[in-house]
Image (cartoon, rainbow, N blue to C red):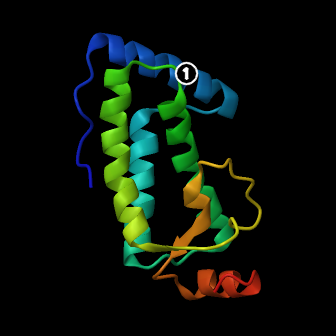
Amino acid sequence: MINELPDFDANERIELELILETMSHARKRQVNLDYLLMGWQRFVKHIERGYSSSIYDYTNDLSKRRLLQRVLDANISNRLKLKLTNLVRQIDDQFIALTRTIDEPIPGTKPEAEEWWYYRVPLNAGSELQKDLAEFGLA
């Protein structure tokens, strides 16, 4: 897991600011890298402890990973992309270890082909999520 963000040089900070400003405008709320990375990490920690919320909350929490992917897919320098990919991969690896694959995406989502996280559910799901998963035939 990550404890702090790496140092970004001035050009990398400008690249990030432009991308995140566009995302903030589209979402009508401030989006920053700390919010995305630490939010994804907190979500994975929640899964590690036993995800106790509903499938709707779970789906909402997965949206941070989608936003991170949009940053990674943006037209950014290779150096910045490598830094960000390494950070995200650390959290992704933990997420993969704590979840299992399902055949269909989580109900209510319309993932792009590369959005593999929508095809995974926690191994340690709390009772509410277990109930929801069973209701959708994903238990």
79, 13: nearer the viewer: 79
Quadrant for residue 138, please give it.
Answer: bottom right
Is 23 positioned to the left or the right of 9 in the image?
right
12, 26: nearer the viewer: 12
Q: Residue at x 61, y 60 (%)?
A: 118
Q: Position of residue 11 (x, y in %)?
A: 34, 11
Q: Residue at x 38, y 77 (%)?
A: 49
42, 79: nearer the viewer: 79
Residue 78, compared with residue 88, is above or below; it is: above
Q: Looking at the figure, which quarter contains the N terminus? A: bottom left
61, 103: nearer the viewer: 103
Is 134 positioned to the left or the right of 39 in the image?
right
Q: How many marks?
A: 1
Q: Position of residue 90 (x, y in %)?
A: 31, 52
Q: Residue at x 60, y 22 (%)?
A: 22
Q: Position of residue 6 (x, y in %)?
A: 23, 33
**Type of amino acid at the residue the image marks with label 1:** Glu
Q: Residue at x 36, y 22 (%)?
A: 78
Quadrant for residue 107, please give it.
Answer: bottom right
Q: Is residue 86 visible?
A: yes
Q: Looking at the figure, which quarter contains the C terminus? A: bottom right
Is 136 positioned to the left or the right of 96 in the image?
right
Quadrant for residue 4, please give it.
Answer: top left
Residue 116, compared with residue 125, is above or below; it is: above
Dot 1: what SS? helix
Q: Is residue 31 visible?
A: no
For disc 1, the marked residue is 21
Q: Position of residue 48 (x, y in %)?
A: 37, 73
Neighbour tally class for label 1: few under 14, some 14-19, many 20 plus, Cα within 10 Å: some
